[in-house]
Amino acid sequence: MATPLRVLLLEDRPEDAELALHELRRAGFAPEWTRVETEADYLARLDPALDLVLADYHLPAFDAPRALELLRARGVDVPFIVLSGTVDDQAALACICQGAADYLLKDRLARLGPAVTQALEAKRLRTAQERLQAQLVQNEKLAAMGQLLASVAHELNNPLSVVLGQAVLLAELAGDTTHGPRARKIAQAAERCARIVKNFLALARQQPPERRTVHLNAVVQEALELVGYLLRVDDVVVTLDLAQGLPTLWADPHQLHQVVVNLVTNAHQAMRGSSLPRRLTLATGLDPRASRVVLEVADTGPGIPPEIRSRIFEPFFTTKPPGQGTGLGLPLCHGIVEEHGGTMEVDEAPGGGAVFRVELPVAPPPAPPETITAAAPSPRMGRRVLVVDDEPEVASVLADLLAADGHLVDTAASGQAALARLEDGSYDVILSDLRMPGLDGPGLYREVRRRDPGRARRFVFLTGDGLSPETRAFLDQVDARLTLSKPFDLAEVRHVLSQALCR
């Protein structure tokens, strides 16, 4: 089967043009060609979708070097082959140096087919190299963003822990008085800030899937919470049609969060050039016949032309202008959905625009291995707890939360101070921040384990930057795997403490 070839032919002699086209057909190409003779016509026909430019060196209006110069000035990456009726080594060398793929004599056109094949292959390799380079740059950006976000999250989650913890304590102290609802509103606002930080971190998460029970509606609402402000600024009206009573999914919530944010962001960008009203609709539902949960994201943008719908999930394929898209977002989402056993499709939305449909299988979590364990005793009050954190306010609010449950709490502002405390007294649980100046949490844990391996089992680690590779690597290596993520509330503190005391 002949290979389609879109050719722009700069030739003033029809018979020479036909000879060139004949050689292309003989080489297995099916040329779709346009012949031009003037500079204005040439400029009007230049298009990145072209596969090849064939140019006679001498034309009445302009010559091949000028055509090549215009091609490069436009930034169009199309193989350019010069044809000439005379031998001129200097002219040939100049064209090659200027960027021409080849320089051929008209009386040796049998070389045209191989020259075109070689030029097309060179372009394919060059494009692949550019895409690989773009992917490497993107990966470096993600890695750098991950490190930055880990640091930002640590700095934000410390004060959020204080606000949330004090609000919880104030709400319990106020009870049903007029101050109770106000304290609960403060706690709700702090929780919302904490969710935004966690959702932001999820966008740069680079690690294997961590599946657990997930509510799709909650993932949708959290994603919208992250990008809601930008949608409001651009007058995008968001409609939620979330089915109630959906079965839960066994999935990685962070990866599903990436999918929803990416689809919403793409829809937002597509509608920026559209006139008002701009509408974004997110709907969930259940397909009981296929035991699948369905998510649809529809917009009122220009839509996706049918001829390219089959390509939008290809890596590096993008309809955005250069510099505005990597072509990696939708392929990443497609891969995540397929990894979860689902499907992802795109179609025209009713009334115009695009609609993305994601289907995810409803599957129960894998059964845990059968083990026979004794019932864990309920932790008694009045246990001795050591809180280690270089942020005094964080240590203080955590101590207050524990003291409210009747525990005896001491605090230490550093790893070294914690070791001194451990020399003087016995503690049932040690709650230690991971990131501290001097002797940090991992260093403190290792020293305690060296001195008393049994006590090391009662460590609970406080972390505000779960994204950090160093943090994940350490927690994967140690035996004490209990963690308390900042910001924390009283219920989380009680749960983790109960686990630690029952070990």
Image: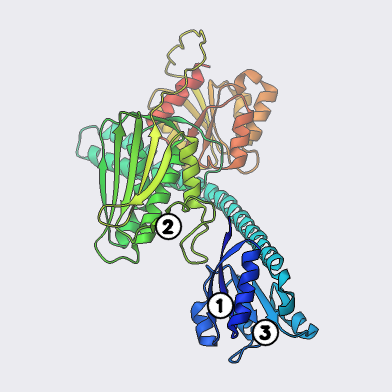
Mark closest to the chain's N terminus, 2 or 3: 3
Residue in the picture at 60% in, 89% down: 62
Of badges 2 and 1, nearer the viewer stands: 2
Q: Position of residue 143 (x, y in %)?
A: 59, 50
Asked if residue 319 lies left or right of residue 20, the reply is left
Mark 2–mark 3 distance (CA, rounded to whole Å): 36 Å
Q: Which residue is mark 1?
A: 74
Residue located farthest toward the bottom when viewing the structure as drawn: 60
Residue 57 bears which disc, if any?
3
Residue located farthest toward the right when viewing the structure as drawn: 89
Q: Which residue is mark 2?
A: 307
Residue 354 bears which disc, if any?
none
Q: Report helix, strand or loop for mark 2.
A: helix
Mark closest to the chain's N terminus, 2 or 1: 1
Q: Residues within 10 Å of mark 2 (few under 14, many from 20)?
A: few
Quadrant of residue 247 within the rendered picture: top left
